Image: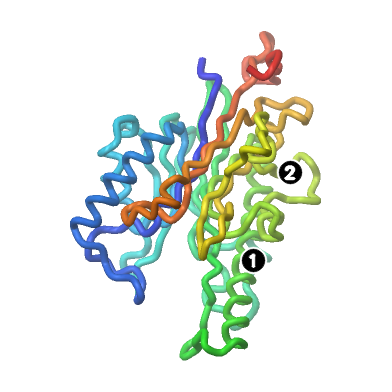
Amino acid sequence: MQQEIRFATFNVCNLAPPGARLYENLEPSTPEEYEAKIAWTARQIDMLGADVIGFQEVFSQASLAEALSRTRRYREAIHVGFDPDPGADKLTPSVALVSRLPLADAAESFPYFPPGIAMPPGNRDPDRFTRAPLHAAIEIRPGLIVDVVVVHLKSRRPDYRANDTGDDPQLFALASLRSLIRRGTEAAALRVILSKLGRENGRPRVVLGDFNDVADAVTTGIVLGIGAPSGDRLYDACQLQRRQDRLRHVGFSNLHDGQYTTIDHILVSGEFNSELPDALGEIADVVYLNDHLDLGLPEASDHGQVLARLRLFEPSASQPGGPYIPPYGDA
């Protein structure tokens, strides 16, 4: 019986067919550039070796499927994702999930905010996520189902209004504030969704994604549910890992303007926090695949990948599905 489950999050950075116009300031990729990106993405997916991977910045689910077909380990994996509306004014990114473990139910997306959550008046799309979160129930072991949610919160890119430019400090500040408000609103909406999943399903939860903010940011804290009852809150896998070596800690997932930060996170519910009673498992360690950020490979993502190794405890003889009895030692 599999005792170690690997979860990963992977921002693939503008994965789209060659010739697709994504942004006004970004030239479409050539067939050669696309081929290099697909090949690099496939190798990176194999290198992760995760059982469940959440993807962000997928402009085409078909392109992700092509990358999976080039892998050695994921050709038969389950791939779920929803392409953007083909009738939309412009192509927009979405998220996806790939699992080598079985799904317990059909996957679903959450394009709209829950009731009671909305952007302030005057904002575009006040009632919906920039990129809809994706939810899938995954059976990580017979009788043990985990609700996995893949997310990509609003970026820090300033949200300018028509004819605004960054040359005016005031307009730049207001545009940056609008982005922060949207990211915060999305975080609040996500917190409501995660709480509802926990309350209605009573199952462990794992969140994989690009939060566009560091772990101790207010927006990330909202998603974590800091201050909420212990049974409802989430925990940063990096902070829970058993093997902490502060002198050699090189975890980062983003390099921007010379600054190393971690904005891609894996969050878990209390069932995988070994410090809590009745835990089902623990985070053995968290690994960052980020060498390509320093190498500056043109075909590579501008994000590092985050991999969390979850070690399940042995089930008790009387209750195969739990509670779980921790093993002795840290081996």
Side of 123 where 84 appears, left or right: left
Query: Callout 2: 10 Å neighbours few (<14), some, many (20+)?
Result: many
Mark 2 or 1 closer to N-term? Answer: 1
Cα–Cα gap, marks 2 and 1 = 19 Å
SS for callout 2? loop
**Tag on residue 185?**
1
Amino acid identity at mark 1: Thr
Side of 322 where 166 appears, left or right: left
The residue sitting at 53% across, 64% down in the picture is: 129
Residue 292 screen position, x and y as percent: 41, 48
Per the image, the residue denoted by label 2 is 232
SS for callout 1? helix
Residue 46 screen position, x and y as percent: 36, 34
| 316 shown above or below 289 | above
Residue 124 screen position, x and y as percent: 53, 77
**Tag on residue 220?**
none
Residue 267 screen position, x and y as percent: 62, 43
| 181 shown above or below 310 | below
